[in-house]
Image (spheres, rainbow, N blue to C red):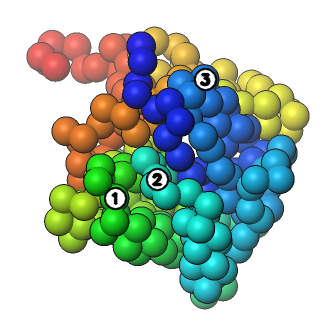
């Protein structure tokens, strides 16, 4: 399927390089002919000369990078935010959460999304075609899927809740779509010796599968191209996790 992304500029921010999500998304987009730039948060496994390494939580650094990109490119078709806070401040529950944990998660997860809205909205003023922003977040950001990681869940939730407001405030100048993704099958599970944990997660999913990086990236590419009807909406990619038929109560219609 031709998504109409040939020669279109797509900027990918973050991506938790250790997961391979940014690189996989870039591969899928370039397969469609898109031109990609990665704003690396320091975790990317593969960085090109055309990419930028930047502290995405620093508004001045964010602005400087966008100025450089705009000097080189006349237009932009899309922006993919895949930012996330440091794993070191992802703690169980909330009783041990300190102010610094909240700050780290918020500064590296929520703030970069807001900065992206600002820069893209300004650029959109001179564009003939409204660009699309895909805000990639964890399904933890949705209340019914919160996973007992208070600081992390809260920052992800803030990013997700900003999607609807940004779509309204942009006044038709850009499209904003949220993607709340569940567990991804990525190399880290095996590398960290948690392959069995991944299998347990898969057992809680109706089709017994965990979403692959390629599947997730294909969703992003589709929303960038054909997702306008989802403007301001949040799409959960959790495969109905925890909703297996064997969990249904007998004698009750579902």
Picture layout, residue 227 above or below residue 218: below
Residue 214: where, in percent of width, then height?
A: 60, 24
User: Left or right: 165 with respect to 135?
Assistant: left
Residue at 68%, 52% (x, y): give it. Answer: 38
Residue at 41%, 25% (x, y): give it. Answer: 3
Q: Is residue 87 visible?
A: no
Which residue position is annotated with label 2? Answer: 76
Residue 43: where, in percent of width, then height?
A: 79, 55
Residue 88: where, in percent of width, then height?
A: 76, 66
Of mark 2 and mark 1, the one earlier in the sequence is: 2
Circle 3/circle 2 CB separation < 8 Å? no
Please, what secondary structure does the residue beneath circle 2 have?
A: loop
Circle 2/circle 1 CB separation < 8 Å? yes
Which residue position is annotated with label 3? Answer: 31
Residue 169 occupies which quadrant of the picture? bottom left
Q: How many other residues sit within 10 Å of disc 1, few (<14), some (14-19) or many (≥20)?
A: some
Please, what secondary structure does the residue beneath circle 1 have?
A: loop
Residue at 53%, 36% (x, y): give it. Answer: 7
Q: CA distance from mark 2 to mark 1?
A: 8 Å
Q: Which one is nearer the viewer's eye here, 224 or 186?
A: 224
Which residue position is annotated with label 1? Answer: 127
Please, what secondary structure does the residue beneath circle 3 have?
A: helix
Q: CA distance from mark 1 to mark 3?
A: 24 Å
Which quarter shows the N terminus? top left
């Amino acid at each position: 399927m031709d998504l109409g992304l040939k020669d279109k500029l797509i900027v990918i921010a973050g991506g938790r390089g250790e997961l391979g999500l940014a690189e996989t998304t870039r591969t899928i987009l370039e397969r469609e002919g898109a031109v990609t730039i990665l704003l690396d948060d320091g975790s990317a496994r593969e960085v090109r000369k055309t990419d930028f390494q930047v502290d995405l939580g620093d508004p001045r650094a964010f602005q400087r990078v966008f100025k450089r990109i705009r000097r080189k490119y006349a237009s932009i078709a899309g922006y993919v935010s895949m930012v996330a806070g440091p794993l070191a401040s992802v703690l169980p529950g909330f009783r041990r959460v300190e102010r610094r944990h909240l700050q780290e998660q918020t500064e590296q997860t929520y703030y970069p999304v807001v900065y992206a809205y600002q820069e893209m909205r300004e650029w959109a003023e001179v564009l003939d075609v409204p660009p699309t922003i895909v805000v990639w977040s964890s399904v933890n950001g949705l209340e019914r899927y919160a996973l007992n990681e208070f600081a992390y869940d809260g920052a992800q939730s803030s990013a997700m809740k900003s999607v609807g407001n940004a779509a309204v405030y942009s006044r038709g100048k850009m499209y904003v779509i949220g993607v709340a993704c569940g567990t991804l099958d990525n190399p880290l599970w095996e590398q960290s010796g948690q392959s069995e944990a991944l299998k347990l997660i898969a057992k809680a999913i109706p089709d017994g599968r965990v979403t692959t990086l390629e599947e997730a990236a294909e969703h992003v590419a589709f929303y960038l191209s054909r997702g306008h009807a989802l403007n301001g909406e949040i799409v959960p990619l959790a495969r109905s996790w925890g909703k297996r038929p064997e969990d249904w109560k007998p004698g009750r219609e579902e």
